[in-house]
Image (spheres, grey):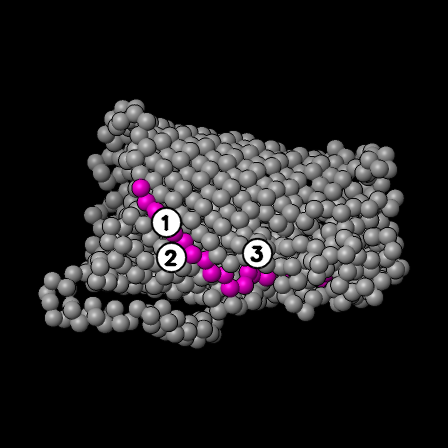
Amino acid sequence: MSTSIQATLRRMGPLAVAIAAALGCAWPSIATAQTAAANTAAAQETTGLEEVVVTAQFRRENLQTVPLAITAVNAAMMEQRGQSSLHELTQQAPNVTLVETGGAFGPGMTATIRGIGQADFDPAFAPGVGVYIDDVYYTSLTGSNFALLDLDRVEILRGPQGTLSGANSEGGSIKIYSVRPQGNDTGSVKVSYGQRNLIDVQAMADVALVSDSLFMRISAVSHQEDGYVTRIDYGCAFPQSGIAAVGGLQQDCVAGKEGGKDYQGGRVAFRWLAADNFEANLTADVTIDKSETAAVTLLQVNSALGLATSLNSGFPPGNAAGVAYDNRFVPNNPYISYAGFCGVGIAGNNYCFSPDTHNKQWGTNLTLDWQIAPELALKSITGYREFDTNWTEDNDVSPLSGSLGAEHLLNHTLTQELRLDGSLASVFHYTVGGFFLDQVTTYPTHQVLDYIAPGLLFEFLGNDPIHEKDYAGFANVSWQILEPLTLNAGVRYTHQEKDYTYNRYNPSTIGGGDSVFFPPGFSGTKGEFSGGKTDYRVALDYRWTPDLMTYASVSTGFKGGGTNPRPFVATQVVPFGPESLTNYEIGAKSDWFDHTLRFNIAGFYSKYKDIQVVLLSCPQYSGGSAAVPCAAPVNGGNAKIYGVEVEAAYRYGGLSIEASASHQHFEYTDVNPASGIPPDSSAPGFQPTKWSIGAQYDARISNGATITPRLDFIFASGYETIAVPDAFSYLPGYHELNGRVTYRPESNKWEASVVGANLAGKLWYTQIFDLYSQSGSNYGIPTAPRTVWAEFKRKF
């Protein structure tokens, strides 16, 4: 461990460079301010750090008094950093990895905290990181990279939140809180325009419908942006290749773009102050996303698999026979793709899928707060959400017919939570409550997987319903034993029931009915999981001074089991069990120098049991044949995880600096021999090192206006993407530099900004899909190149 920490410290050497770069353009103003402070007593005024309020323990508390590792970011900080999505927001949070998915996993998000989470969108799996919007649980990774519209704050809770957030928050929780209506008759409009025809418009209005009692807040966003990967018609660009052009003659042989964004969303919120002791908040939101398919490019091809006969496809008509799937389809330019999105199914059916996505989601929630007595309150949170999502993928990322899919997910979810909060003599606080979830997801799919059996065209339709119900009861207490000593404890029991029904059919062009690739009567086969788990948490904190608190805690979390949702043969319908985590943590939270410097640190050690991993080869479930494709989840073994996290913030006058750093280590202590996992490997998605620094300076000029330059620098190390690593499964790390310059007049009625992302123009990949030994393809999602845009915001 000491060697790893030393390596981490060496990597942090560029921190000094980043600080110097962030402050360089503002240095003259800083020097002027310091000179004035030295000569004039009135200029010695210090603006310290603001108090941050969180509700992680079901009540409003100062962040610095909560014995949890929490990153809290308010709306002002999001805007200063130019962050417009959940992925961008979490880049500065230690040991947190949130990235957009794509390809076969569609429009969603991979989320891990301290290496615990989930990448697969399939509803057979639990997320591992709980995402909550105004305390309403969002059950799916699909569509979860939310646009940050009209938010008050975001709280990122690291470590298992089994007692506070419930099941499926094993790694941690991300809690998003929108602004409640104030009835202050205010509004704002922000317009952005930039490279790749980026156009973003956001608007908000907050009005009183009935003075002092009924308020309404409306917000909306519209965002368009061109893609940054160019899709080339291979037959057009290489007419001697033996592959016919799909679209005929085209200008520059361009078939389209990938990675473009096109979404609109809106939210309306009502707040009713019915009495001095009763408040109701009703919200409804909708988002319609019609973006292009994710920016996917081919990285390597395993031509040794000999798939030429299955991939020559004969489509479009005129293709030469025996065209091999090899490295000719790997472009020299990382922002080019030769994906054709066309293929040939059984009976010679030709398909071309549209390379785009469509996601419509909406939801509503009603929160009721009743102050029954001065020290007794009841809260009810009712949520209902639906989404309807379509996307397509070309997983061989070539003009040939190897792996083509069209996916469709439909989901509706009802949740209900009740909390009773009370306190006794201001030294004993308690919360007891219950939670209920009922969700149904239907997963229609059309798969053309010709790589599975060379010379045989493999195709089927699926239509799988998945039903889940959760029941939970919980209790949490906080006891101030002595004035500086507090005990926090909690317990939650959760019972889960989930069933997955398999349906496999032939396409209607050959008569429909049960799939020829599965046994007769396979459709209707059901896999079930049912189980309960008790989680607990105990935390003891001691406040040494008003500005220094230390704590120690132990907490647990889990995510439930299920059944393999992707059997390639009937014998691969196998169950997998739940996994669990026990986390031991110590930490300190402190403010220094009249609240101008904040420094928080946490160290943790976790026991990770029955880890759920996906095997890409499983002869034990495939009749002894390792050549049969596989995507079976299994409980691969046990491991220990330990690490350290640091967050710091400094503010003096107009100067603000925020920094974070984390390092963690993963080690298997026991491996299931049948899994084939090397004992010295790491878990998929486990990121060892991450750090960031951001700095800005509010420089006042002679007319009273403010100019604020800001730079943010992020480093994140690489990690393995599959359970059994190979030569192409490692996703390298990256450095990213972002910047912003903002001008505000003295009236603060408007502001203008220039914002830049990936200012250094670096290329890295946000995802790698390694199917090198399965279908022969290894493809990735490159990050967008340098992007600069301008913003103008007007307040009313």
User: Closer to the N terminus: mark 3 or mark 2?
Assistant: 3
Residue 704: x %, y % from top left: 22, 58
Question: Answer yes or no: do the residues labelled 2 and 1 have beta carbons within 8 Å?
Answer: yes
Q: Please report the bounds of the magenta region as a residue range.
A: 772-796
**Callout 3 amino acid:** Asn
Q: Which mark is residue 638?
A: 3
- Mark 3 Cα-neighbour bin, 10 Å: few <14, some 14–19, many ≥20: many
User: Would you name the residue on which mark 1 appears?
Assistant: 793
Asked whether residue 131 appears in the rendered view, the answer is: no
Residue at 29 percent across and 71 percent down: it is: 27
Kind of residue at disc 2: Ser
Mark 3 vs mark 1: give the one in front: 1
Q: Is residue 326 above or below residue 750?
A: below
**Residue 169 location (% of width, % of height):** 48, 45
Q: Nearer the viewer, residue 485 or 716?
A: 716
Distance CA(mark 3)–CA(mark 1)? 51 Å
Q: Is residue 359 magenta?
A: no
Callout 3 touching callout 1 (CB < 8 Å): no
Question: What residue is shown with label 2?
Answer: 753
Q: Position of residue 423 (x, y in %)?
A: 27, 35
**Kind of element beneath mark 2:** strand
> Dot 1: within a 10 Å radius of its alpha carbon, few (fewer than 14), some, or many (20 or more) residues?
some
**What kind of element bears circle 1?**
strand
Residue visible at 21% across and 36% down in the picture: 425
Q: Amino acid at mark 1?
A: Lys
Tell me the quarter of the image containing the C terminus.
top left
Closest to the camera, between mark 3 and mark 2, is: 2
Nearer to the camera, 160 or 566? 566
Left or right of 205 in this view: 114: right
